[in-house]
Image: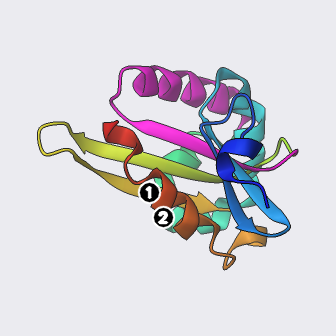
Amino acid sequence: MMTNEQIIQPDSIRSIIISSNEIIDVFKISKDDGWKLCDFIVSNEDRLLDFLPRTREQNLTPNLSELFVSSKVKEFDAKQEFLFTLKRKCHKDIIGLIYIKKLDWVKMQGEFAYAIDYNFEGKGIVSKVIQEMSNFGFL
């Protein structure tokens, strides 16, 4: 069996083995994610209304998503907030989002927020990703 380090995609932050046939790649939000993010948001619009209403609101059209992504890339680079996309190995579609936000660099803590596509809910993906990423923001 391959380890996470052996299967990591060139642009991904981390590859996480969910099961013997499911590997999830975690990517830093990228300027190329606008359209894919919009697709994810629109497909999961009802679910995001309660949990990530501002993210939903800012990504209802491709143009809004492009602006959102541009802003989030800048925040990531400035270490103000980290947004990651989750994608299945060898697929380009976004199946989830993981935020590390409300960062307190003095206390070395932050808050996770997340969303997963309804087709992938209940598979333990978010739990495993958060477990793997829990120290990312303070490395």
Please give the residue where the numbered disc 2 appears in the rendered image.
51
Q: Residue at x 33, y 30 (%)?
A: 80
User: Local crowd at mark 2 within 10 Å, few (<14), some, or many (≥20)?
Assistant: few
Query: Which of the 4 quarters of the picture holds residue 6?
Result: top right
- Extent of the magenta region: 61-90
- The residue under the point 81% across, 70% down is 20
Tag 2: residue type? Phe
Number of numbered tags placed on the structure image: 2
Residue that sits furthest to the left in the current view: 106
Percent position (x, y) of residue 107? 13, 45
Q: Is residue 96 above or below residue 127?
A: above
Along the line of sight, the residue nearer the viewer: 94 or 1: 1
Q: Are marks 2 and 1 in contact (CB under 8 Å)?
A: yes
**Residue 90 as seen in the image, left or right of residue 101:** right
Q: Residue at x 56, y 66 (%)?
A: 128
Q: Position of residue 10 (x, y in %)?
A: 73, 29
Percent position of residue 84, x then y: 56, 42
Using the rendered image of the protein, determine whether residue 52 is visible from the camera's viewpoint. Answer: no
Position of residue 129 in the picture relative to residue 39 (left or right): left
Snapshot quadrant of residue 1: bottom right
Task: Name the quadrant of the C terminus.
Answer: top left
Label whose residue precedes the other's in the sequence (2 or 1): 2
Q: Residue at x 56, y 59 (%)?
A: 129
